[in-house]
């Protein structure tokens, strides 16, 4: 078997041990003679899988019973609509910090349903930093303050929860959830598409303070209202059963590896390895402000965009896959999610040194 070093931003690498276990269990799940994809989501076999996954996620992240944990579909993008529809009244003020492409999309969607105030923006700095908290304008009557905890495209990460100025704090954690321990209690809503650090595409996690569930508008689609899902254990309709099952295996893998503290140690070391190599060279450049550099997504550029193609071709030949930067920023991007090992980063750094030596 030949597993590539996969730096994809999403859908992204999954732990090999998880895929092997899914493979072993695929045709005959726990002696049922059926795969987990082939049984009712309301039957005891799947319910046990679903409950175990939620319990493990709660334990890994330290999520109290004050929060509902929802297993949904529609991606983080659907939550861009669900957040204003569940938390604000029509035309009410909602506050957003604009730190990059995903913030912008969330802002645009919220503007369809509410009066968006952009509390702060780093667009003028080409999204390479986070504006100082003291400069933010968070109206006290805002229904909530929304931030993107990690900008997957720009590689800008909040190192900790910002001060929400007394309003509810909502975070898009799609590309940073489970990468390190966080203080869940600092947040009112955390949401994340699964395909970066949780499991396969098709599943979306929402962790929401139960006391907020009654704030939803009454006329929204049932499948966008968090309360219905909270009341029905995320089984308002057929959930993405296979993705839920696989996410449960990923949670179990993280637990066995030592939990989020161990993930954080590994992720910090991987990120440091790569940023240090970039900073030590005059050839590669990491554009993001050191204080806000993402552990998960590392964008970097070469001195001449004409070198991008040969860099990528050589990388692929060396088994280093999916390093092309997002089309909106160009250059390279290495995503270093939990399933990407230190060995992958070491191989990347060695390749980068070789490439610099032959092209610098
Ligand atoms: C990937 C991503 C999204 C979009 O997720 P979908 O599941 O494709 O809707 C939103 N926000 C962030 C931060 C992301 O990384």
Image (cartoon, rainbow, N blue to C red):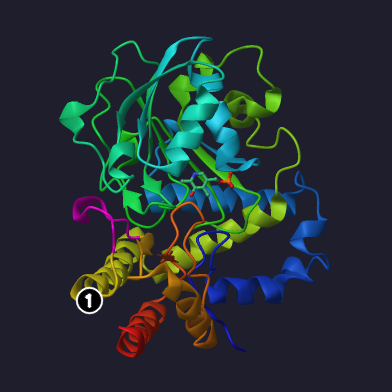
Q: Main secondary structure of the magenta part?
A: loop
**Residue closer to the observer: 40 or 93:** 93
Q: Position of residue 195 (x, y in %)?
A: 56, 56
In-front residue for pair 297/171 = 297
Q: Residues within 10 Å of mark 1 (few under 14, many from 20)?
A: few
Residue for point 71% across, 51% down: 241
Q: Quadrant of the N terminus?
A: bottom right
Q: Residue at x 49, y 33 (%)?
A: 106
**Element under disc 1:** loop
Residue 221, horizontal then vertical, whole percent: 69, 22
Q: Which residue is mark 1?
A: 281
Residue 83 shows in this picture: no
What residue is at 76 percent from the left and 43 percent from the top? 42
The x, y position of residue 6, in whole percent, is 51, 73
Res 179 → quadrant: bottom left
Q: Is residue 11 above or below residue 207?
A: below
Residue 125, placed above or below residue 133: below
Q: What range of the chain is rendered magenta?
A: 286-295
Number of marks in picture: 1
Relative to the observer, which residue lies in front, 140 or 303? 303
């Amino acid at each position: 078997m030949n597993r590539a070093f996969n730096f994809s931003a999403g859908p992204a690498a999954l732990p090999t041990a998880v895929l092997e276990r899914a493979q072993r269990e695929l045709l005959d799940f726990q002696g049922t003679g059926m795969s987990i994809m082939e049984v009712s989501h309301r039957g005891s076999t799947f319910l046990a899988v679903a409950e175990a996954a939620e319990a493990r996620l709660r334990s890994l992240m330290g999520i109290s019973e004050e929060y509902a944990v929802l297993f949904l579909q529609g991606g983080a993008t659907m939550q861009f609509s669900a957040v204003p529809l569940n938390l604000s009244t029509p035309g009410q003020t909602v506050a957003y910090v604009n730190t990059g492409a995903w913030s912008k999309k969330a802002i645009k969607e919220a503007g369809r349903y509410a009066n968006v105030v952009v509390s702060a923006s780093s667009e003028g700095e080409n999204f390479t930093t986070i504006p100082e908290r003291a400069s933010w304008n968070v109206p006290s009557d805002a229904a909530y303050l929304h931030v993107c905890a990690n900008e997957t495209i720009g590689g800008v990460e909040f190192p900790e929860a910002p001060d929400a100025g007394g309003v509810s704090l909502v975070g898009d954690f799609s590309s940073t959830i489970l990468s390190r321990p966080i203080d869940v209690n600092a947040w009112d809503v955390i949401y994340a598409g699964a395909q970066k650090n949780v499991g396969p595409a098709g599943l979306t996690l929402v962790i929401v303070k139960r006391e907020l569930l009654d704030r939803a508008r009454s006329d929204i689609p049932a499948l966008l209202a968090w309360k219905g899902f909270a009341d029905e254990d995320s089984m308002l309709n057929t959930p993405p059963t296979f993705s839920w099952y696989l996410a449960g295996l990923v949670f179990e893998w993280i637990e066995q590896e030592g939990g989020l503290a161990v993930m954080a140690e590994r992720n910090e070391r991987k990120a440091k390895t790569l940023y240090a190599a970039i900073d030590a060279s005059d050839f590669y450049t990491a554009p993001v402000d050191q204080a806000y550099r993402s552990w998960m997504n590392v964008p970097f550029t070469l001195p001449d965009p004409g070198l991008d193609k040969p860099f990528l071709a050589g990388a692929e030949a060396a088994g280093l896959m999916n390093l092309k930067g997002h089309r909106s920023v160009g250059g390279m991007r290495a995503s270093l999610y939990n399933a990407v090992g230190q060995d992958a980063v070491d191989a990347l750094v060695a390749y980068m040194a070789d490439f610099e030596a032959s092209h610098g």
